[in-house]
Amino acid sequence: MPQLITDFIKAGKERILFVLLGNILLGFGVAVFKLAGLGNDPFDGMNMALADFFGMYYPLLQVLVNIGFFVIQIIWGRRLIGFGTIVNAFGLGYIVAFWIQVLGSFMSTPSLLILQLIMVVIGVLFCSLGLSMYQQADMGVAPYDALSIIMNEKIRKLPYFWARMITDAGCALVCFLAGGLVGLGTIISAFCLGPVIHFFDLHVSKPILGRK
């Protein structure tokens, strides 16, 4: 924790702002995915499904799940912990719930597939930009994201790509078993977020932060 405080002090206002704004945009994107009605990304979709299954408030359940992954991160990936870890793990669920309430007050899930797909595209763009900003700030990794990095480092010959596929597939399976929606939006998020995040890394986040 002293290292976390030191990193926060040294980070500078720009990187702290990137973490906060990145999570706000990410939360907006997740909310749009939810309202599109075609399925969320595997992790958020799993947490939403489990919250409905157990009758819990979604942000609270997400915090509890993140605490479980956070314990793993403390044991095997302490170097991945930072200010961004705390904001994402304990704040993102509440940000998503806020945006769902705001957006749901004046819109509902479209009945036409084309409109649902447009919302998914909007969700991909906002999620990707938010993830790019918060990750490029280099102030810690979310507990769930850290899990695949730790697997890549600790399990011999397991590439990161497959580690991430395993964790995402596991979340999608739990989401399905809990009665959640695993649909076209889930598939699009799995295959499109990476390339779009890379685009925003190159053309938005890194140039603003002055990183090569």
Image: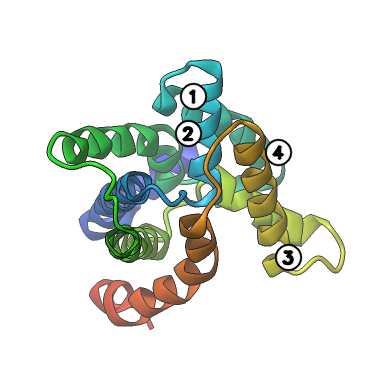
Give the labeled residue for mark 1: 52
- Mark nearer the N terminus (3 vs 1): 1
Q: Amino acid at mark 1?
A: Asp
Give the labeled residue for mark 3: 162
Give the labeled residue for mark 2: 48
Instruction: Tell which tag, 2 or 4, sits nearer the viewer.
Output: 2
Left or right side of 179 for 36:
left
Looking at the image, which is closer to me, 201 or 17? Answer: 201
Q: Amino acid at mark 2?
A: Met
Q: Amino acid at mark 4?
A: Ile
How many badges with numbers are in the image? 4
Instruction: Tell which tag, 3 or 2, sits nearer the viewer.
Output: 2
As drawn, 96 above or below 19: above
**Crowdedness of circle 3 by 10 Å Cα count: few (<14), some, many (20+)?**
few
Give the labeled residue for mark 4: 75
Measuring from the top left, give residue 119's x and y in whole percent: 29, 59
Proximity of marks 3 and 1: CB atoms separated by less than 8 Å: no
Measuring from the top left, give residue 5's x and y in whole percent: 40, 39
